[in-house]
Amino acid sequence: MTQQMLPSDANPYGNVHGGVIMKLIDSAAGACAGRHARQRVVTARIDELSFVAPVVVGDLVYAKASVNDVGTTSMEVGVRVEAENVLSGRIVHVSSAYLVFVAIDERGEPVAIPPIAAETPDEVRRQEAAKRRRELRRQRPRREA
């Protein structure tokens, strides 16, 4: 997904709000997850999100999403965000995030989704890293609501 940052996306100093970037990340990841599952999907978790460079008004922001690994009803989607200064052409890495989505039916119940087959060395690396993150998530104690 690509979006040009406007004054309404920024603070008075021209820096884009982190929440605007977060929304773009969630939208790109949701589109990617829904496309894979061919089902409704909901965001279950944003596992990790980091901001490594600022975005300013006028930048084109690209969010690139990919399904890293799939469980029975859930999947991890990785998103990389880059910003391009349209005047200079300079592109910088802005943010990265891992999100977990669950596929649901019309009643909101989880449903099975198709697996993925890692084919390239990069896909294999991303899938193995996603499996490690999934194990770490399972080891964390759950909070009661």
Image: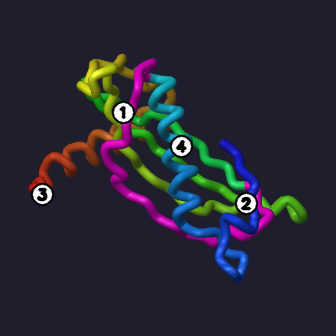
Q: Earlier in the sequence, mark 1 or mark 2?
A: 2
Which of the two discs, 1 and 2, sits closer to the camera? 2
Estimate how packed mark 3 is, as few (under 14), some (14 to 19) or many (20 or more) residues with alpha carbons within 10 Å: few
Part of the protein shown in magenta? 37-60
Residue 66 in picture, x, y percent from top left: 51, 36
SS label for mark 2: loop
How far, Cα to Cα, is label 2 from label 3?
Answer: 36 Å
- Image x and y of residue 60, in percent: 75, 55
Q: Is residue 80 left or right of residue 55?
A: left
Q: CA distance from mark 4 to mark 2?
A: 15 Å
Type of amino acid under label 1: Asp
Element class at badge 1 = strand
Q: CA distance from mark 1 to mark 4?
A: 18 Å
- The span from disc 1 to disc 3 (Cα, nearest Å) is 25 Å
Which of the marked residues, 1 or 3, is nearer the chain's N terminus? 1
Mark 3 sits on what residue? 143
User: Whole-Å distance between the Cαs marked 3 and 4?
Assistant: 26 Å
Residue 27: numbered disc? 4
> Is residue 57 rendered magenta in the image?
yes
Would you say 90 lies left or right of 73 here? Answer: right
Residue 7, given in percent of the width and then of the height, sits at: 75, 68
Q: Is residue 26 magenta?
A: no
User: In front here: 104 or 60?
Assistant: 104
Q: Quadrant of residue 65?
A: top right
Residue for badge 2? 5
